[in-house]
Image: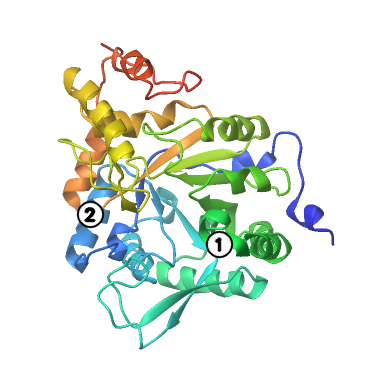
C-alpha cells in the first residue's frame, strides 16, 4: 500500500474534525510525572481530583511523562469517575524500558530512575505502547492518540529516516487503531511547526497538539499552519501556553524558555509583555491562557499542572475577564502578530 494512501491523503476538509471533542482548558500531566522535580502521590491525586471537581474534563498524558508515572497516577483517579465524564489523550513514539544503570536524580528531564525512554516509530512499537498505556490508565480506549516528538527539532539529521518510518509504520498503525475504535482520533504532538506542515498534506490527521509555538510570546511561524489546519478541518490543541515557564509567574518572567535557560532577547521580549500587563493591571498568565483559544482552529489549550494551587490558578486565569484594551496594547508593542485573532472581551 502506498504511504500516502495508507495515511489518507486529503486535500479538502478532513472528516476527522468531528472525531475531536476536547474543548476549553486541558490538564497537562507532565508535571505530575515528576517533570524536573518529584511530586508526591497525594499531591498528584489531589490536583487531578480537584481539576475534575472544578470542571476540567480533558487530560493529556504520555508514557514519556515520568516513564509511565503520569499515566498511572491519572488512571488511579479516573477509575472513580464515569468514563463519559472525561476525555484522555496519550502518545506513542517512545518505548519505556527498564534500565538499572539510570540511577541519577533526573532521567530525560523527569525525576525517575531505573528506566529509560527509547524512540520507536515502528508498527510493533505503536501497538505495544498503546497496550501499555491502556493498562496504566485503566481504560479500554483513549479519545486521542498522538505521535510524539516526530520532527527535525528532536531528531536532527535522523529526521528523514524517522519521518519515513512514521509515515510507513507508525501513522498507518494509529489509523488502524482508530478504525478499530481503540482510539477516537489521531494526530501528532510536537514542539515545531515545520513537521506539521510536512505531514498535513500526507496524512489523514484529526488534530495536532502544538506546544509552545502559538502563544502570547510567539505566533508568526505558527499562523500559516493554523490557517492551513482550519482549511483542512484539522483541530489544533495548543500546549505550553506559558512557553516552558517563561510567562507562568504573575510577578515577572521565568528563567526558562523552550525547556532551556532563557536568553537576553527572550527575557527582553518577556519583560515587554509583563510591563504592558502590569500597566493594564492584568495577570500575564490569564492573557497567555486566553490568547491562543481565539484562533478558530484551536479547540483546547493544555497547561501543565503540578498541584491544587496550579489547578485553581489555571481555571481562574482561563475565566478571568480581561479589559479589551490589553489586546491592541500588546499588538502595538509588537507582541501579538497583526494577523493573529484576539479574544472578544469585556471592559
Q: Which sits earlier in the primary sequence, circle 2 or circle 1?
A: 2
139 relative to 52, above or below: below
Q: Residue 243 falls in which quadrant of the image?
A: top left
Which quarter of the figure is the C terminus placed in?
A: top left
Q: What element carries label 2?
A: helix
Give x and y (percent) for residue 90.
Answer: 47, 59
303 relative to 299, above or below: below
- Along the line of sight, the residue nearer the viewer: 34 or 154: 154
Which residue shows up at 31% across the image and 66% down it? 73
Give x and y (percent) for residue 49.
Answer: 25, 54
206 relative to 101, above or below: above
- Along the line of sight, the residue nearer the viewer: 113 or 295: 113
Give x and y (percent) for residue 119.
Answer: 54, 70
Residue wearing tag 2: 47
Residue extending farthest front: 264
Q: What element carries label 1?
A: helix
Which residue shows up at 67% across the image and 44% down it? 200
Give x and y (percent) for residue 95.
Answer: 50, 74
Residue wearing tag 1: 155
Amino acid at each position: 500500500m502506498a504511504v500516502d494512501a495508507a495515511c489518507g491523503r486529503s486535500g479538502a476538509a478532513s472528516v476527522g474534525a468531528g472525531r475531536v471533542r476536547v474543548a476549553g482548558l486541558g490538564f497537562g500531566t507532565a508535571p505530575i510525572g515528576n517533570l524536573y522535580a518529584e511530586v508526591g502521590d497525594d499531591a498528584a491525586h489531589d490536583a487531578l481530583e480537584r481539576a475534575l471537581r472544578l470542571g476540567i474534563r480533558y487530560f493529556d498524558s504520555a508514557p514519556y511523562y515520568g516513564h509511565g508515572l503520569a499515566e498511572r497516577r491519572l488512571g488511579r483517579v479516573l477509575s472513580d469517575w464515569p468514563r463519559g465524564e472525561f476525555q484522555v489523550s496519550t502518545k506513542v513514539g517512545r518505548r519505556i524500558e527498564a534500565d538499572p544503570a539510570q540511577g541519577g536524580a533526573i532521567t530525560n528531564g523527569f525525576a525517575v530512575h531505573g528506566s529509560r525512554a527509547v524512540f520507536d516509530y515502528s508498527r510493533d512499537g505503536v501497538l505495544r505502547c498503546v497496550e501499555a498505556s491502556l493498562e496504566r490508565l485503566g481504560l479500554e480506549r483513549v479519545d486521542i492518540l498522538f505521535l510524539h516528538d516526530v520532527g527535525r527539532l528532536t531528531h536532527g539529521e535522523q529526521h528523514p529516516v524517522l519521518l519515513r518510518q512514521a509515515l510507513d509504520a507508525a501513522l498507518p498503525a494509529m489509523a488502524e487503531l482508530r478504525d478499530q475504535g481503540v482510539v477516537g482520533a489521531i494526530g501528532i504532538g510536537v514542539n515545531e511547526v515545520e513537521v506539521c506542515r510536512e505531514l498535513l498534506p500526507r496524512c489523514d490527521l484529526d488534530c495536532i497538539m502544538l506546544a509552545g509555538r502559538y502563544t502570547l510570546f510567539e505566533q508568526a511561524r505558527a499562523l500559516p499552519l493554523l490557517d492551513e489546519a482550519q482549511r483542512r478541518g484539522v483541530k489544533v490543541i495548543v500546549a505550553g501556553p506559558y512557553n516552558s515557564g517563561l510567562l507562568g509567574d504573575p510577578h515577572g518572567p521565568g528563567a526558562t524558555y523552550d525547556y532551556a535557560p532563557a536568553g537576553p532577547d527572550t527575557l527582553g521580549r518577556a519583560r515587554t509583555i509583563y510591563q504592558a500587563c502590569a500597566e493594564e493591571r492584568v495577570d500575564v498568565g490569564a492573557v497567555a491562557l486566553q490568547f491562543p483559544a481565539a484562533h478558530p482552529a484551536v479547540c483546547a489549550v493544555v497547561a501543565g499542572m503540578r498541584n491544587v494551587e496550579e489547578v485553581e490558578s489555571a481555571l481562574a486565569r482561563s475565566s478571568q475577564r480581561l479589559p479589551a484594551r490589553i489586546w491592541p496594547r500588546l499588538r502595538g508593542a509588537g507582541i501579538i502578530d497583526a494577523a493573529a485573532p484576539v479574544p472578544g472581551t469585556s471592559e
